Amino acid sequence: MKKRYTLLLSLSVLYANAQTSQYLKAVATKADAMQTQIVSWRRDFHEHPELGNREVRTSGIISKYLTSLGMEVKTGIATTGVVGILKGAKPGPVVALRADMDGLPVTERNNLPFKSTVTTEYNGQQVGVMHACGHDSHMAILMGVAKVLSDMKGDLHGTVKFIFQPAEEGAPAGEKGGAEQMVAEGVMQNPKVDVVFGLHINSQTEVGKITYRPGGTMAGVSDMRITVKGRSAHGAYPWSSVDPVVVSAQIINCLQSIVSRNVNITENPAVVTVGAIKGGTRFNIIPESVQMDGTLRYFTEVDHKLLTENVRRIAIKTAEAYGATAEVQIPYSNQYPVTFNDVALTQKILPTLQTTAGKNNVLLVPPVTGAEDFSFFQQKVPGIFFFLGGMPKGGNSLTAPSHHTPDFYIDESGFTLGVKALCNLTLDYMASSKKK
């Protein structure tokens, strides 16, 4: 049985490589010819970022372009989402390709000619807006893919659904949005999607490289809110209080023992982080309550349950020990599943990535504790999410500015590799499916 499996695996790899070589030159030529246009789109999006569910200008540019390519275009999905449908000349599967559109409430520090100077109101504060995670790159790359595959329509054995998604970073308070909402509004239907591919630029991976991982690739995430209630008093007479500040400090310290003492970190990583503490109004007044907001990260449902149960137990029992009470909400506003790359599909498409980028440039990496709502698409159909290098060659991954920071920077020379990868994945998947 083992020999038979090895033979079948070898034949599938050879077949995938043969299919890739069939289209490789045409895709490469078309993608390289679009480099200037892709960079131009990216810089325009970068200079004019919009927050989640506010991507009005952005979606307008995208929908107009997809329409110009002769696609059936749907707008207003999950508020500002855009979907373009490209029907190939021959029957076959439906392949979905996704890019996210929203920027972040970050003030840019880079001195670029296309630097963002946009400001807006977010959570009651005036903030800068910046594409500090690379979504501008994702959109420009997918628009390039749309052009290349439209030009190759006669070679398509199936349909391509281009999904431009709003609010990947989360919808504003009180609103719905993102991949979950697009799925709820039927984006994976009419026509029904068979497989979904997506990529994410990485500012700490050298340009020209692609990284991937089968199985759990990015963490599932639940936000949490812990509200500690005590008894207020004058700061000069703490014995009259049940101090929620002291109780909160003890809870935070105890929460750190969950990962270090309860999670088997040899199997899966996990994270418990408190990121915000709100309590009190004046230096000499012990407040009545303190609110803590944080995040849980996990790669299995077993660990998700373990983290949730331990946070509740520690917060409630620690507060009780000090005469206070604690209310725990997990999640309190959003929760993303684990971004899980279908293992069999990963094995199937790996030769395509290796042929496109060069085998030595396609790297298997550990799981990432960041989260992605691409996972909602993967709950419906098999999907692959991989990373595209965006750090200048020779850069230091330890010192390169990370995502979600004011100094976030991307080398634009790697964009065409992203175009080629998504095009070749689509063409190869269709070709392999028609032979079944």
Image (tube, rainbow, N blue to C red):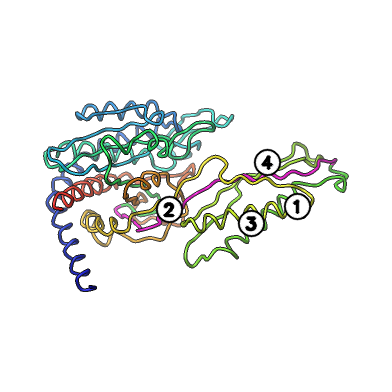
Q: Which mark is residue 278?
A: 4
Q: Residues within 10 Å of mark 3 (few under 14, many from 20)?
A: many
Report the residue at 38% width, 60% height from top: 365
Label 1 sits on residue: 320
Residue at image location 27% in from the left, 59% down from the top: 347
Mark positioned earlier in the residue sequence (4 or 1): 4
Q: Which SS class for mark 3?
A: helix
Residue that numbered label 3 is attached to: 255
Near mark 2 (Cα within 10 A), the count class, few <14, some 14-19 or many ≥20, is many
SS at mark 2 in the image: strand
Amino acid type of disc 1?
Glu
Residue 113 seen in the current view = no
Which SS class for mark 4? strand
Q: Is residue 12 left or right of residue 190?
A: left
Residue 125 is drawn in which quadrant? top right
Measure the C-alpha gap from mark 4 to mark 2: 29 Å
Comparing 17 with 12, the one in front is 12
Q: Is residue 213 within the magenta segment?
A: yes
Image coordinates of residue 46 in percent, x first then y, are 39, 35
- The structure residue drawn at horizontal position 56% and vertical position 29%, both measured from the top left corner, is 126
Instruction: Tell whether label 1 touches label 3 (CB within 8 Å).
Output: no
Marks 3/1: CA distance? 15 Å
Disc 4 or 2, which lies upstream in sequence?
A: 2
Q: Three-letter amino acid code at disc 3?
A: Leu
